[in-house]
Image (cartoon, rainbow, N blue to C red):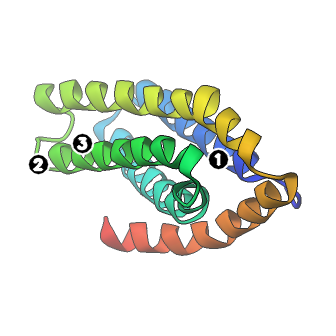
Amino acid sequence: MANATIFDRLKQDHDAHRQLFAKMADAEKDEQLRKLFEQFVVEVSAHAAAEEETLYATMLARPDLREDAQHSVSEHKEIDDYFEELADLKFNGDAWRKKFAEMKKRYLHHIEEEEEEMFPDAAKDLSAEEEEKLGKLFAKRKPAELERAKADN
């Protein structure tokens, strides 16, 4: 993925998140589910931070894209709030499963909205060079964000 654009990299992460949801759905033991969920929280937290520092920072600086970026940042905050609520509930209990289902629905809606609406709109405003530069910056930022997210969780 040497010349991957920001959108390629973000979509690749989204696909990995969808795969984690599928693995969680197939998990037969609580410990397996817990590990997958913890991985999901770390991955999504790092993804969101790196996305905000690269694509969203660029979009916020452009009047035509600012509203989309603000909307997505608020959705990232909403997912973080779900993570905090889930942490306060008995893992894999009825209330946890209900809250997890809500979070999953919101997150899948968020990434679908990004891929189908926001990314195409942003692509109209960014040059191919900018998309590639942001992709490289995202690839550089994400490992540091993964380390930070692991330390926080």
Q: Residues within 10 Å of mark 1 (few under 14, many from 20)?
A: many
Q: Earlier in the sequence, mark 1 or mark 2?
A: 1
View extreme (front): residue:
63
Residue at 75% x, 50% y is 126
Type of amino acid under label 2: Asp
Q: Is residue 61 above or below residue 79?
A: below
Q: Mark on residue 44?
A: none
Q: Which residue is mark 2?
A: 88
2 with respect to 21 (left or right): right
Q: Mark on residue 10?
A: 1
Q: Is residue 109 above or below residue 38?
A: above
Residue at 32% x, 70% y is 152
The quarter holding residue 12 reads: top right
Residue at 48% x, 60% y is 46
Which is more foreground, mark 3 or mark 2? 3
Q: Is residue 97 above or below residue 81?
A: above
Q: Is residue 90 above or below residue 21?
A: below
Mark 3: which secondary structure?
A: helix
Residue at 20% x, 51% y is 84
Q: CA distance from mark 3 to mark 2?
A: 10 Å
